[in-house]
Amino acid sequence: METLKCSGLGKRYGSTRVFENLNLELEGGHIVGLLGPNGSGKTTLIKLCCGLLTPDAGEIKIGGEKIGPKSKAITSYLPERMALAEWMTAAQAMDYYADFFEDFSRSSATEMIHSLGLDENQSIKTMSKGTKEKLQLILTMSRKAKLYLLDEPIGGVDPATRDYILNTIINNYNPEATVLISTHLISDVEQVLDQVIFLREGKIILQSDVDDLRMERGKSIDEIFREEFRC
Amino acid sequence: MLGKLIKHEFKATARIIWPMYAGMVVLALITRLAAMPLLDSQHSFFINAISILIIFLFGLCMIALAFMPLIISAVRFKKNILGSEGYLTMSLPVNTDQVLCSKMITSLVWYFASALLGLAIILMMVFWGQDIQLFSGGIDLKGFFEEAARLSAENKKIIWNVVLLITEFVVDGVILINLGTLIVYASYSIGYSVNKHKSLLTVVLFFVLFHISNWVCVLGIFIFGRQSQRWIDFMTGVNGLQSFLAGMLLLMLISSAVLYFITRFFITRKLNLE
């Protein structure tokens, strides 16, 4: 069974069409890059998959479940911005995740927090932007989910933090799960991807295995992306 | 999951409300023990002015205490659902009804707690330092209960009517308070579904929905009040007041349902977290 299946998906923002009849299927056990320029629909697709938006047409199934509490229980979502309450401490944020997500592993979250040298009792509002992003990623990756939706996980952070984030993703995701990473910083994520999806104006223009694509075109994914989306 | 949502809702709101309650008690003590005894013409104008200022401040804070649960509920709704926290809240494995119910239940509990605190403060202000003998000589509780038992034995309908009337008052009060919360939620959920002038639209919508709800209530008072021929007649059964409260309850429930479904529709179908 597919981890993620979008059938005939349609979404509009007022008079602007984002998706029309989008079909997508992703199998488990892969890290997939959702690549496209700004406004191509990457974030909208992720928001639809995690239930923040409702499609106007078609349907999405995650692990065979329509979007709802059951699909959300097996989906681990990293939003593009800080979603944790600033007044919480790292420990309180872990309590929050442990209460709502049965697949949350407190021990692995604690281990990663300690390895970062973070104090569990430090409040989030006193943390730097990079540390907040790391904490949010740790909480997301400490779940044994079937689908990880990571929206721009390396956007706006320094190169060292970028490496930390990518290592955390590779070392902690459930091997049977699908990790969907939305980004336009292709050269940084290319090394960790198994598959890529190129999205342009709400349409999938390319979906392929990364190694096959590199072999076929004799170029890196970053170069292929620049070629496909040349202005 | 509803229980967990309520637990975290209390955690998030209590950290603001408890210090406010503590501050209110301290201010009440200062007012009762320091400002009120100083309010004497024999003191200088300056001391009297400070005393009046403290008493005035206390009065303002008592008014604020009445509105505090609504304000905190509004801020919480905005931050936790429509703000950046909404990314996490709305992706929890719960349904929208559970999220909304947890917020409404928590808000109602804080209203109840604020009312109790307000009452306790007023009683403290009135009876502080006085020799209160309510039970030893002021009120004959034993006689009261004996008389109540005699009356209810003579006419069982009376006791049931009184119980029903009190229940109706309480239920009407709870629904009315929740209606206020739902007006705020509906205003926010519509106002924040657009991309520009969100706050302005929310304020305008609040006043529009508030006035519509007021007019619905006035209409209810007019319709159900006129039909109530005998308002209070304990021997025949308080029917007029009961049917008035029941009619108002029905109207408020319909208004609440409309506002609830507006809120629910906008946060599920039109959520705009940009």
Image: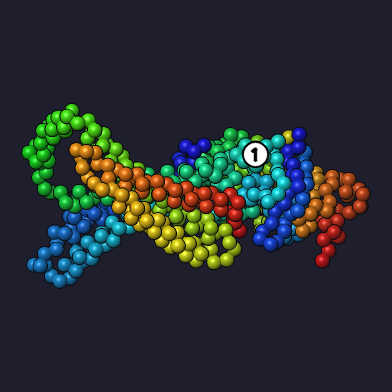
Q: Residue at x 24, y 33 (%)?
A: B157
Q: Secondary structure at mark 1?
A: helix
Tell me which corner region of the image, top left, top right, bottom left or bottom right, holds residue B208. bottom left
Please tell me whether residue B119 is drawn above or below residue B94 in the rendered image. below
**Which residue is situated farthest in the bottom direction here?**
B45
Which of A27 and A175 lies nearest the eye of the viewer?
A27
Please tell me whether residue B140 is drawn above or below residue A44 in the rendered image. above
Left or right relative to B273: residue A32: right
Residue A86 seen in the figure = no
10 Å crowding of disc 1: few (<14), some (14-19), many (20+): many
Please tell me whether residue B63 is drawn above or below residue B12 in the rendered image. below
The residue carrying mark 1 is A71
Residue A60 seen in the figure = yes
Which of A149 and B231 lies nearest the eye of the viewer?
B231
* Chain of the residue displaying label 1: A
Left or right relative to B90: residue A16: right
Q: Residue at x 65, y 45 (%)?
A: A50
Q: Position of residue B260 (x, y in %)?
A: 49, 49
Q: Position of residue B52 (x, y in %)?
A: 20, 65
Q: Residue at x 19, y 38 (%)?
A: B235
Which of B109 and B36 lies nearest the eye of the viewer?
B109
Type of the residue with mark 1:
Ser
Q: Position of residue A229 (x, y in %)?
A: 82, 61
Left or right relative to A131: residue B155: left
Q: Residue at x 74, y 42 (%)?
A: A5
Q: Position of residue B20 (x, y in %)?
A: 34, 53
Tell me which corner region of the image, top left, top right, bottom left or bottom right, holds residue A1. top right
- The C terminus of chain A: image quadrant: bottom right
Left or right relative to A217: residue B253: left
